[in-house]
Amino acid sequence: MKLTVWTYEGPPHVGAMRVATGMTGLHYVLHAPQGDTYADLLFTMIERRNHRPPVTYTTFQARDLGSDTANLFKSACQDAYDRFKPEAILVGASCTAELIQDDPGGMAENMGLDVPVIALELPSYQRKENYGADETFFQLVRALARPVEKTPQISCNLIGPTALGFRHRDDIDELSGLLSDMGISVNVVAPMGSTPSDIKRLGAAHFNVLMYPETGETAARWMERDLGLPFTKVVPIGVGATRDFLNEVSQITGLSPFVDDSRLRLPWYSASVDSTYLTGKRVFIFGDGTHAITAARIARDEMGFEVVGIGCYNREMARPVRALAKSFGLDALITDDYLEVERCIEDLSPEMILGTQMERHIGKRLGIPCAVISAPVHVQDFPSRYSPQMGFEGANVIFDTWVHPLVMGLEEHLLHMFRDDFEFNDEAGPSHHGGHAAQRAPSVKTMDIVPAEIKETKDVSLEMVWLTDAEKELKKIPFFVRGKARRNTETYALAQGVYKISVDTLYEAKAHYAR
Amino acid sequence: MLEPNPTSCSNAPILKERGQREVFCGLTSIIWLHRKMQDAFFLVVGSRTCAHLLQSAAGVMIFAEPRFGTAILEETDLAGLADAQQELDREVERLLSRRPDIRQLFLVGSCPSEVIKLDLAKAAQRLSKIYAPSVRVLNFTGSGIETTFTQGEDECLSSMVPSLNESPDKQLLVVGALPDVVEDQMRNLLAAMGIDSVSVLPASSVKQEVTVGKKTVFAATQPFLGETHSALERRGARHLPAPFPFGADGTTAWLKVIADEFSVSDARFEQVVSAPCARAKKAIAQASKVLDGKSVFFFPDSQLEIPLARFLITECGMSAIEIGAPFIHKGLVGPDLGLIPEGPVLSEGQDVDLQLDRVLKARPDLTVCGLGLANPLEAKGLTTKWAIELVFTPVHFYEQAGDLAGLFSRPLRRRAVLSREAAE
């Protein structure tokens, strides 16, 4: 038993729904109690889908448990088949139905339906959403895909995008364009946008582009082995990764990796002098493994940030994330415990967070700017405009998205210079964001008159003490660097064996860390 | 004033359907209960699905340090490798040491905990002994196999009834969680009539004692409190059946039943309600201009459907095509049913595919439905109001009557505004 407040991933059957909802001509019959239909709203509300997910739930209740839940499943399955006429049916159980052991797979297979029935065994008490999507797609491919004649031109499949994926819709377009520039056509995009018939002709492609290892890797590995389709290992998020990806595709196909990159703006935007203030910004990165890994490279090599922490919530990606963290001289944070992530961010006090919907809320609470780089995401992360993460346009989007939450360069200087201006001060937040009132917090004033002995708060170690004047001086530093200043000063003081931090200590530390 | 309709829906046949039910489970009630009861923590004993539901159901995540969480059952709990009761004790200890401000802990049963027959009543008793007197531990079910959406609140409140202290005095007990601002308005109205001994279940903290006894009369502000109704009757309290306090007329009728019970003179009653009632009518008239003459179709969601349909029909000039409810408790919604003229289909339970067929055929002007159905129906050209907002928004009593009408009129006004833009 483990206490959870917020979860990064839903249960595995939600992963199966992401596959089914991304496709057409497929129907998922889910043995589940009343209430599990909540999952529909993830798709209709968060992703604003204009149709119901193709899922029939048996919605059994307590009174059914005493009688016959198995028949309830059979009639739901038959009704779904009659009404929706799918090309193939997925059947499975949610966590509660798994406990009553009705064997939906076995029942559905014996119903004599004239379409393929694919039974899913998703262990709800061990695994999670990404596993559910990956396993479901793998089972679909294994059941339907067979060796077929290759397309005459070089073509590939785009593997991994699902419903409710972070920017999957636009990543598909961006990659299709890049590949087309290389002279490669797209055979099938799956699961999102495909039908069961499309799955049957996956083997017509010459290779697979594995867009999202989280949801497509098992299927990609099976196709490599059973259909002879090699797959790409580089996920093209960021400038460097996109170029590596093009080279990888070039090695597979023998085609030239040089494509028109005239619309790529990230490198120049990052080199232009206005971006100087980005140098060495301390960032914390957290998300699914794939997005965290790609973000780290962009952050360090393309934006000039300092990565101070990195982690992922999906244990399946722990190994590569740990390896990457090591190469950055860091320990990876592998956890799906929201409170642990929050504690880690609080300890590191970064200047910016690159995270998920959860970290956005942590950032809001701690007053740290945050840009979203990974699922889980909320409705505002499904923008109506084209905004991929992959490819050259993805890099441009990432530059804009990551810079937006920060205070702009010259504004940052002005805040340092005129920090007591009653209208223009650090409490007001970045001036290009609305909704901040430029009021001086009265709490600051009351704190100033608290007697010194109470004011001596203990930090870092039991002996470390901030003297009143030093604490006051710290308050004059704008909020977006205050955390760093406090931390640097304490680290410096500790190294010097100083346990009472004075104004002098603060400025000695500032001089010590000057860059 | 509302008069019972001689040709009302009171005895109309009810279409009972069994099929896929597109409704939330009772755990969803925790989303508002944990804000209402400020010293309570709701610990769901369930699966990852339960945790995922809780963070998804409200449409937004409430990150203001939630007073709820899920103890997720794992493989070891199910295989009997770990003693689930011991595991629960450990998690509760951790939780209470982290949150010393908690005075009431609710262990909330879920589908998986009920299927594996994890005895949460026993756990609550044991934990109560350990943590008394500082923390009271109770249990109720919010599972989908036992409860639908708002029935979670019903289960929660009814779990509190047996432990309420006995009171020999004549008093009014109002049951149902209301937003604080609305509860204050209600108390002010009752106080103005001279009814002072009023308590509300649930109270916002254990410090506000709620009592019950033979001389207690109770009024419900929510129609989904069937179990609580029975539990209070078992304690000797007497129910005051009334239409629910939605809109100007509904509020007046609800207050009148209480006023009569406490022998408030007509003159005093008039004096208290006339101004707010007139204000409410004005506000409704303003907001319901676009509702007048339009048709409405309710999908089952919160059990608020019948009282809300009554409001839309008798106060906003609408007609109902179908009023679906997950469960119809005539002891509670009877007075509202008696005010709805014959005509609409009354349905209980659901077969969502068949109901969707009916709504698409009827093409009502406004469809009240859950979040899973709203956008798909909008895409088919229907105008929808998502039902969950009716549970999360202050809608009771006079001062909210205009807002309530506004919740229904806004989707219609929006559609009109957008189509005008598109036509230009």
Image: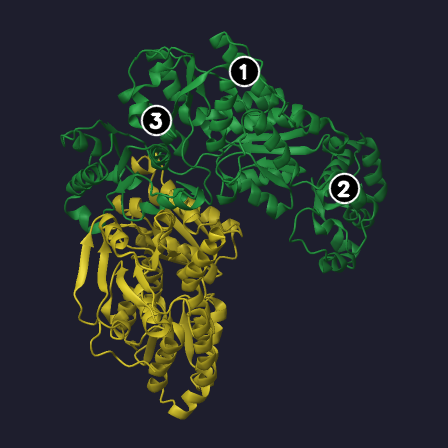
Q: Is A226 located above or below residue A89 in the figure?
A: above
Q: Quadrant of residue A241?
A: top right
Q: Can residue B326 be seen here?
A: yes
The colour with which the image depicts chain A is green
Q: Residue at x 75, y 60 (%)?
A: A446
Closer to us: B122 or B59: B59
- The span from disc 1 to disc 2 (Cα, nearest Å) is 38 Å
| Chain B, colour shown | yellow
Q: Residue furthest top?
A: A254
With A165 as the anchor, is A108 left or right in this view?
A: left
User: x, y (%) of residue A40?
Assistant: 35, 44
Q: Which residue is mark 3?
A: A137
Instruction: Give the answer, above or below, for where B348 lies relative to A92.
Output: below
Q: Which mark is residue A246?
A: 1
The three-letter amino acid code for the residue at tag 3 is Phe
Q: Of helix, strand and loop, which one carries label 1?
A: helix
Tell me, yes or no, if residue B86 can be seen here.
no
Q: Measuring 36% from the left and 34% from the top, which residue is drawn there?
A: A12
Q: Are marks 1 and 2 on the same chain?
A: yes
Q: Label 1: chain?
A: A
Query: Nearest the camera: B206 or B72?
Result: B72
Residue behind mark 2: A412
Chain for numbered disc 3: A
